[in-house]
Image (cartoon, helix red, strand yellow):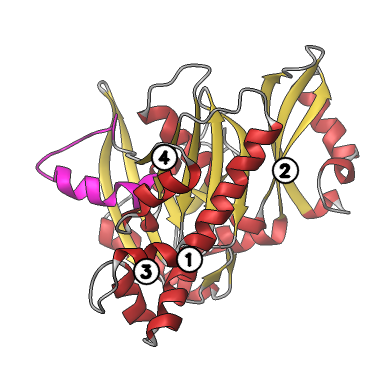
Amino acid sequence: MGALKDLLLGSKKVAGLDIGSSLIKLIEIDDTPKGYALKSYAQAPLQRGVIENGLVHDLAKLTNTIKGLFKKSKCRVKNVATALSGHSVIIKKANFARMQDEELRELLTDEAENYMPFDDVSEINFDFFIIGENDLNPNQMDVMIVAAKKDIIHDCTSAVENAGRHVAIVDVDSFALEAAYEENYDFTEEDIVALVNIGASITNINIVKGGMSVFTRNFLLGGNAITEAVQKNLGVSFEEAEEAKLARGVPLNQEELIEYTQPVFAEIERSIDYFSSTFMDPYIKKILISGGCSHLPGIMEALTARTNCEVEKFNPFKNITYDKKIFRESYLENIGPTATLGVGLALRRIDDK
């Protein structure tokens, strides 16, 4: 599912650029006769405050960081796929009578205020994906609608354009997770899996059934909130608290760390409980966790206990080949959870639907 896309002429290949609030990841994936192959991966830290809650606050610093990252990686791909996140994008599931794509687009354009929380449709870009027949009414179809204000999209894309690249696809982070899952994991039509990406300031949840999104939610809590809790309780700087959180520097036992993650866990649990109470066949087979926080000591065991679900680290390179002379297996295993969104973006192609 490629949301808010701008189709362009030229090469179908894109570089995946995951712009997080603390780290930017750039990934290039080639098409080969043997399938997808990882060509390059690079990442660069982003100064605190440049992006907050998914919104750009310092365009110049973001542009310079992106420009430096492309130079560091030696990636020559001009077309880029990036993603919107958090409260900057609206994702809504709705039911409609069966109709063709063109009819549905016209309906949504004419009656946007009935389906999206915007008064003026001219201020937004939107797209949709027809999931399929409604479970309760075969005469209706389930549709996922995605919308964002044009000024937010402009801020997101301007930094990339100013860095000398062209934004070919603007996706949604939750759906990039879905793309990485679909490529790397085997599943049946009935398998329900929760894809949970805990970033620095935003946590994305995408629950998929048979590889297709059936529930999404973003909330503004992530690794920074955990670090701030550590900082407050230990009386140290943010940087020292970050080191302590990752089991480096200031001593911090695992039980204390897990206690600091409880607000994030509570929102994940609340999302899963809501899904389970409102959907037919709500049994979640597994939670795949990604993002920098997936490296926290004891987090998978604690989340398993909190949600009563099997929890596993997301491996976005499971079905993607790589040159062992360039990438060590241990390195890919380490960066995998952090690279997941970027992999999903890099798997996009300009003519995707």
Separation of residues labelled 1 and 4 (CA atoms): 21 Å
The amino acid beneath tag 2 is Phe
The image shows residue 236 at horizontal and vertical percentages of 36, 86
Q: Secondary structure at mark 3?
A: helix
Q: Which segment did they paint magenta? A: 318-341
Residue 256's mark?
Answer: 3
Q: Residue at x 70, y 38 (%)?
A: 127
Q: Quadrant of the N terminus?
A: top right
Q: Residue at x 36, y 30 (%)?
A: 184
Q: Give SS at disc 2.
A: strand
**Mark 1 lies on residue:** 21
State the residue at coordinates (46%, 76%): 228
In the image, residue 267 above or below residue 38:
below
Is disc 4 surrounded by few (<14), some (14 to 19) or many (20+) residues within 10 Å?
many
Q: Position of residue 254 (x, y in %)?
A: 31, 64
Disc number for residue 126: 2
